[in-house]
Amino acid sequence: MSEQEIIEKCMENSYRILTGKKTVDDIFSESTCPYFLWNVMDKESGIPVERDVFIDVVDTLIEYFENEEEYERCGELLKLKKKDENKHRRKTRKTNTIGK
């Protein structure tokens, strides 16, 4: 497998995991090259991916799929990123609320 094919597989697998189209187990059982942009085993062990890592992975995928002119995928990833930003904002507001 060429370096470019490995990169493509890595991006595809990462996209499928983040968008819920596949599980980690699905990819490991279906693929001879289960490459990802982050350590997916942390998720399997119940350790959440840090927010900064999540945002970096999503941004990397958006840039990659933008270059591939796969704009529908970019849109899905942007929605995912926006959802995370809103969730983080709500959590920050709740943490910073006094007397409630």
Image (cartoon, rainbow, N blue to C red):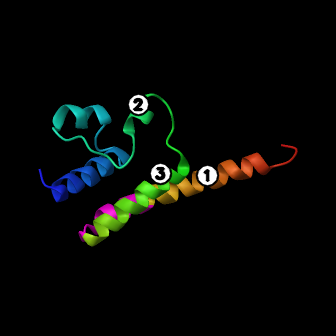
User: Residue at coordinates 70% horizontally, 51% vertically from top-left?
Assistant: 92
How much space separates mark 3 and mark 1, taking CA atoms? 12 Å
User: Residue at coordinates 43% horizontally, 35% vertically from top-left?
Assistant: 43
Q: 6 and 29: which one is in front?
A: 6
Residue type at mark 2: give it: Glu
Mark number displayed over residue 43: none
Residue furthest to the top? 45
Q: Where does residue 66 sit, x and y in percent of width and height?
A: 31, 70
Residue furthest to the right? 99
Residue furthest to the front? 3
Q: Vertical placement of 86 versus 47: above or below?
A: below
Give the secondary structure at mark 2: helix
- In the figure, is residue 86 to the left or right of 81? right
Residue that badge 2 annotates: 44
Q: Main secondary structure of the magenta part?
A: helix
Residue that badge 1 annotates: 88
User: Is 71 contained in the magenta span?
Assistant: yes
The boundaries of the magenta stretch are 68-78
Q: How many marks?
A: 3
Residue that badge 3 annotates: 54
Q: Residues within 10 Å of mark 1 (few under 14, many from 20)?
A: few
How much space separates mark 1 and mark 2, taking CA atoms? 22 Å
